Image (cartoon, helix red, strand yellow):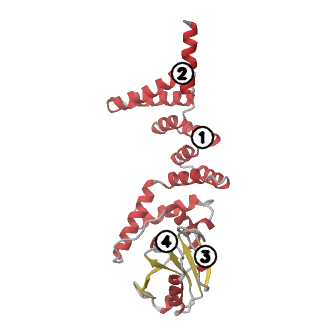
Amino acid sequence: MLRKNERDREYLKKITGLDLEDFLKRLELFNRLDELERERLNLSPEELYEKLYRIGELALELGILNRALNAYMEINDRKKVRDIGQKCLEEGWYFDAVRAFKFLGDKKGVTKIIRELESKDYGLDLEISMKEYLGERTIKSVNRGFKKWISEMGIESACLFDVIPTANMMHHVVDNDYDVGIGIAKGGLFLTYLSHLFELPVKVVHCHKKGRETEFNWVCEPDPQELRGKNVIVFDKDVVTGKTAQRVLKEIEKYRPNRVDLALIYNPNEGIGPGARLSNVPKGYTEVYYPEKFSYREFDKVVERLEKSLKRFSLY
């Protein structure tokens, strides 16, 4: 009988990787979670607190940190949340560490995680952590505001792009002493909108190839004084042949600006596939920006700025 029990234990460990005691505790944890969901609506606040606290204790004992974090966040045990957040950070569970520090309103903690991930070049973990910090509500508000903004200009549709790298870039770019931004419809509209949110005056142009010619027209033609002697930043998604960027530059130069720079959504790619062909950027653009030029070390400031801008436009 003893040998059979030993064989059963060995078989259990082989297929689950767990000792019998750990297996039973995990089973107890998930039974408690199922029971909680069935009974939740009928529990008093005190009973709910007690059940969640016990679930948190058991999950923490088993090292199932995300379940423990969920429980302690629901009962607002901030000390436990901080302890688990720190433990998640130490063990490399960055997504849950961000959840914990975001719950606590600890921007320094979140920024520390993002900087650590960026320094280690943990691309996917970095992306997931920043998305959690930025929040689904903010992303949806940006996208909703963008659709409303282009509709008000009479543009039926335009591509949405990833808010994280574009907003991070615009946070840095718009503060570089620019007086006006000019977006090329439709690919440059998303960057133009973010610049508008960040209080940079913007204009929009249509520029596209028709036959052998590249047609150009302003959505709202600027007053000469708006561009003469000014620092101008042009927005587009990429540069392929460079003809569109060249025509836009030619039209802007008629107003005799001080300088004209270019910001792109796509990072450089001189090979096959999407990306900016920097070798085809026309001479005359003093500086060319793209997302991977910019660190995420100030991402907490990017999020704060974006949220304030959305509130100002009643979008948040």
The secondary structure type at the circle numbered 2 is helix
Q: Residue 191 carries which label?
A: 4
- Alpha-carbon span between mark 3 and mark 4: 18 Å
Q: Residue furthest right?
A: 119
Disc 3 vs disc 4: Cβ atoms closer than 8 Å? no
> Is residue 8 shown above or below 126?
above
Q: Which amino acid does label 3 sit on?
A: Leu
Looking at the rendered structure, the kind of residue marked 2 is Leu
Query: Taking 218 as reference, is 12 above or below it?
Result: above
Chain-order first, disc 2 or disc 1? 2
Q: Looking at the image, is mark 3 or mark 4 earlier in the sequence?
A: 4
Residue carrying label 1: 88
Q: Which of the marked residues, 1 or 3, is nearer the chain's N terminus? A: 1
N-term mark: 2 or 3? 2
- Gap in Å between the C-alphas at discs 1 and 3? 41 Å
Q: Is residue 188 above or below residue 34?
A: below
User: Is residue 166 something that shows in the picture?
Assistant: yes
Q: Would you call the spot at circle 4 few (<14 residues within 10 Å), some (14-19), or many (20 or more)? A: many
Q: Distance between the residues labelled 4 and 2?
A: 55 Å
Whole-Å distance between the Cαs marked 4 and 1? 35 Å
Between marks 2 and 1, how big is the CA–CA gap? Answer: 28 Å
Q: Distance between the residues labelled 2 and 3?
A: 58 Å
Task: Say whether marks 4 and 2 touch (CB < 8 Å).
Answer: no
